[in-house]
Image (spheres, rainbow, N blue to C red):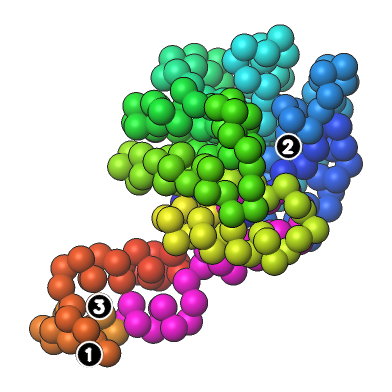
Amino acid sequence: MKRLRNPLFVPGGRPELLAKVARSVPDAVFVDLEDAVPPGEKDTARARVVEALDAGRPELPTLVRINPVDAPWHTADVAACASLIAAGSLDGVVLPKYSAVDQLATLRAALPPGAVVVAGLETGLGVADARDLLAARPEAAYFGAEDYALDIGARRTPGSREVLYARSHVVLCAKLAGVLVLDQAVVAVRDVKAYRRDAEEGRDLGYDGKICLHPDQVAIAAEVFAPSEAEIAHARAVIAAAADGVGVVDGAMVDAVHVRMAETVLARAGEDA
């Protein structure tokens, strides 16, 4: 996946919402069979998701978040997703609570070739071992602050200081592995100001995009994780200056690291440096 700024989660118990997701124009849709479905409704939700996707999938990359490896519904989730992928009704799966490299290898072996896997780092062990886990190269990953805080006994606060180390560690390990990485969710889905503030913090840490739990969050993530016109113009000036052998742009020295930063900005904007 070349770009994943704002995937929108859809509850697995409400697959009828899949017909509406394209209106908010997310980069992908994640149908959630894990946190969004109560234990007593897992099998029913899975059957309804399969039926909905077989009847007609959204016209954008579509993945199903399955239940974690140690959950009793995991095997059935994987089998259902494998059939959907083979039929062209699904692109891949989201694996929550990824905490051992063999979990990814086993999942890949159970899915058709080319299936996309997005891995969630949201436990103490998963965060601690993030470098090895992401070196196994899932197509993308995300940091799950809520489950991580629960796992280590932290208290969630509006400023997220309690997860700053984990949030920073995951993005660092993802960049070392060359894996797209998504920032934490904001569960106050109606608080768009809080979402924008948190998204900007995630962008500044180095994240490529952010989980969206509500359609109102999708446009904000698209805006925050796309470079501004000023950033694009500055990047173009840096590239041009380097090509002409000029060492200064806007009064600042231009060297190799600034050229690479400019190339990254233009790549995020969809331009070829």
- Mark-to-mark CA distance, 3 and 2: 41 Å
Amino acid marked by disc 3: Ile
Q: Which residue is drawn at 47% across and 71% down?
A: 227
Q: Name the residue under label 3.
A: 239
- Mark-to-mark CA distance, 2 and 1: 49 Å
Q: Which of marks 1 and 3 is in front?
A: 1
Task: Farthest residue to the left: give it.
Answer: 245
Q: In this view, does 135 lie to the left or right of 167?
A: left
247 to 264, vertically: above or below: below
Q: Which of 254 and 80 is in front in this view?
A: 254
Residue 180's x, y, as percent? 45, 46
Q: How many marks?
A: 3
What kind of secondary structure does the magenta stretch mostly adopt? helix
Mark found first going from the N terminus, 3 or 2? 2
Q: Name the residue under label 1.
A: 251
What are the residue bounds of the magenta stretch? Answer: 210-236
Q: Mark 2 points at which residue?
A: 31
Q: Helix, strand or loop at disc 3?
A: helix
Mark found first going from the N terminus, 1 or 3? 3
Picture disc at residue 53: none
C-beta proximity under 8 Å, tags 1 and 3: no
Does residue 179 show up? no
206 to 196, vertically: above or below: above
Give neighbour class at mark 2: few <14, some 14-19, many 20+ (Cα, 10 Å).
Answer: many
Mark found first going from the N terminus, 2 or 1? 2
Amino acid marked by disc 2: Val
